[in-house]
Image (cartoon, helix red, strand yellow):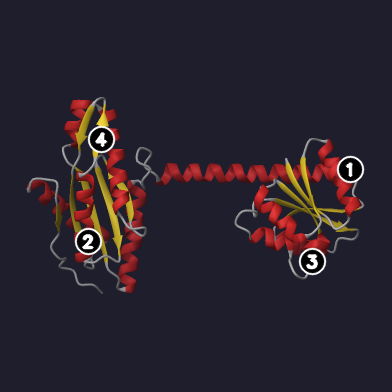
Amino acid sequence: MRVVLAHASPDTRTRFARVLAGVGHDVVEEGEAGAAVARCRSDAPDVALLDVELCHDAELALLGALKRDADAYRTAVVLVEHRDLDFDAAVSALRGGAQDFLVEPVSDAELVARVEAAGRTKGLQEELDVQSRRLEAIIFEDPLTGLSNRRFILTQLGGLVSGARRHGRALSVAIVDIDAFKAVNDRYGHAAGDRVLAAVTAALRGRLRAEDQLGRLGGEEFLALLPDADAAAAAVAAEKLCAEVAGTTVAYEGNDLGVTVSVGWAEWGGEPANGLLRRADAALYEAKALGRDRAVGAPASLHRRT
């Protein structure tokens, strides 16, 4: 494990470092608070072993500085207390992010045990974070494109509709459908179809704003959520999406596959989310009927915004 050891006493630092290094840990010694924080930021240690005298420094509360830092906050902190550990101070430190305490005088065995226990706890927390992210990806992410899946993008739409109704803000959606996608799969196989999906995803992402959201509804259909976009802005966005995809060529086994999309868009007019989607879907069918590779907007909703 990597350990940053910060203690006001040079003799104590030397002894602790010797013991920890003797059992295989990589130890860096620091004698003042600012240097310890900087070291934790740069080295991302597993454990920081800190003298409470440094933590109580009036100019820099070391424990708080570490736990507020975007790079260093994951480091497990073990505080070294001088003899009697005050109950209230201990509770405050634990709630402030300390992992454990050592009360001087500290035996070699206790030093190693507490530091290694803190390091294992940090490792378990990191593993839990990784597993949580994997679970979120399974629940919310389309595995092929990396976009939000149908469930998640429709949930986001519901939230945006609620927000638009509450705050009187504009909102539009665009349904994007890859033209003649079945023909690609039938002629070249599903591997080619997957490559087309990935290329279209990249093209659409490149033309959306940072605040827009893109998800895969299923098959060859995508849904773009366009917050704060009225009819004029949605029309421009939809045309850009069409043009961006039309300029995309997908190379597959010596073939250059041209790709186009049809887009149906609609501005929210006060109706529920499913009504907004129905209008965008009707516009998409019109775009298909008119020859594909184009964007068509839905007529204004008959609902009144309230």
What is the C-alpha distance between the residues marked 3 and 1? 25 Å
In the image, which disc is placed on residue 234? 2
* Closer to the eye: label 1 or 4: 4
Q: CA distance from mark 1 to mark 4?
A: 64 Å
Amino acid on which the number 2 mark rests in the picture: Ala
Residue type (three-letter) at the residue carrying disc 3: His
Distance (Cα) linking label 4 and label 3: 62 Å
Can you give x and y, in whole percent of width and height, for residue 105 in the image? 92, 52
> Marks 1 and 3: in contact by CB < 8 Å?
no
Residue drawn at x 32%, y 44% as measured from the top left: 202
List the residue tagged with mark 1: 108
Where residue 98 sits, quadrant-wise, is: bottom right
From mark 2 to mark 1, how far is it between C-alphas? 68 Å
Which marked residue is nearer to the observer: mark 4 or mark 3? Answer: 4
Q: Report how far apart the C-alphas of labels 2 and 4 lie in the structure.
A: 27 Å
| Image quadrant occupied by the N terminus | top right
